[in-house]
Image (tube, grey):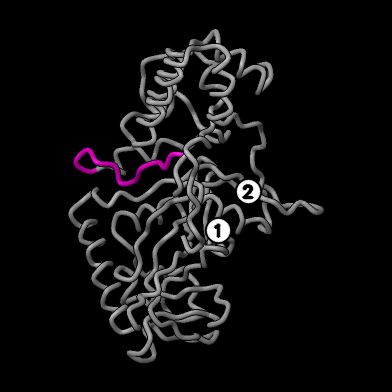
Amino acid sequence: MDQTVQYQDPDYFIIEDNEVTKPDNDSDSDSDFGSNTQVAIPNYWQSGSFRKNNKLMVHRIEEVTNDYMNVKRSFVNGMKNFEKHVEFVGIHRKNYEWSVIDEARVDAFRVFAAAVASRNGGDPNIKYGWYGGSREEIREILCHGFRRFENRSSSYGHGVYFSPANNPMASARSSMADSDGLMHILLCRLILGKPEAIPFGSRIDQPTSTEFNSGVDDISSPTKYIIWEPYMNTLVLPVFIVSFKADSSKTGDQQSVRMKRKPHLRFDVLMKHLANYISSSNMALINRQREAFYKNKISRHAFIRSLRMIAGDEVLRPIMKMFYGPQ
């Protein structure tokens, strides 16, 4: 992200109430433990239309990762003044190992970044930018790249318009709710190189000279990044898909993104409580399982299942009840 990436402390791992209070089973899928949002992500992201050779076009981002925290923070902070109530739902990441063509797109992006950098003092000026659209449009972009959209605004010339990472609102307004009531917005990496200011009403479709690589509506404080049509699939790399829900217009002084506020039980807090009930050897076993989870050697569900087996539900459930309240 354009913002400084903050390290995610491994102890800042949230144990959800339903992960311990509900019956366990042997499945290892995400649906077994749910999300801490109340709106489920529809399974069309995992459907056949998003698969090729049994590979998914996108992967869901786990909530404990830096990518999740940074993208969510950028979106939520930038949507505080949106005219509708917004509920953050989840994030997926584009899988560029999905096809040979996608791998070629990544290689092309790197080649163009190096080429632009060589003409720009060694800096390709890569930024993140938001792009909103319907689910079908975003699917087409993920499958085939950007194309010319006749129904899009061209008030600053013919190109693809992105809003800066700290201002997703403009792009969110271009999003359309799907059949499940969810809206989706892309977060892309953009090679801006040396941008030029484009006046309102311009009809150009490429840089005015070889000195420039992209356009902006304002040099000092841009609200639009403009990638010209001839370069829209070489200077742009879609990375994340954010899903959210927006309902009726705000009234009064309600100006914040609606987030689900509830207590969070951190892993380190849980361990302090468990130390009063289980042996040091079992505490060490749990810590080893946690390390395996953070090194992606086991899934979250596998870790939670190990935690329950080692500590015992008869110990864990009273702690969860004390922290979250009666279920």
The answer to the question of whether label 2 and label 1 lie on touching residues, with beta carbons closer than 8 A, is: yes
Q: Which residue is mark 1?
A: 172
- The amino acid type of the residue labelled 1 equals Ala
Magenta-drawn segment: 52-63
Q: Which residue, as the protein is rendered here, is positioned at the far top?
A: 314
- List x then y, in percent, for residue 215: 45, 80
Q: Which residue, as the protein is rendered here, is positioned at the far front?
A: 280
The secondary element bearing badge 2 is classed as strand
Q: Can you say which quadrant of the picture contains the C terminus?
A: top right
Task: Answer few, some or many: residues within 10 Å of disc 2's Cα (few below 14, many 20 plus, some between 14 and 19).
Answer: many
User: In the figure, is residue 282 to the left or right of 171?
Assistant: left
User: Residue 138 got which mark?
Assistant: none
Give the image quarter of residue 207: bottom left
Q: Which residue is mark 2?
A: 86
- List x then y, in percent, for residue 302: 38, 23
- Residue in the foreground of this view, choosing between 127 and 255: 127
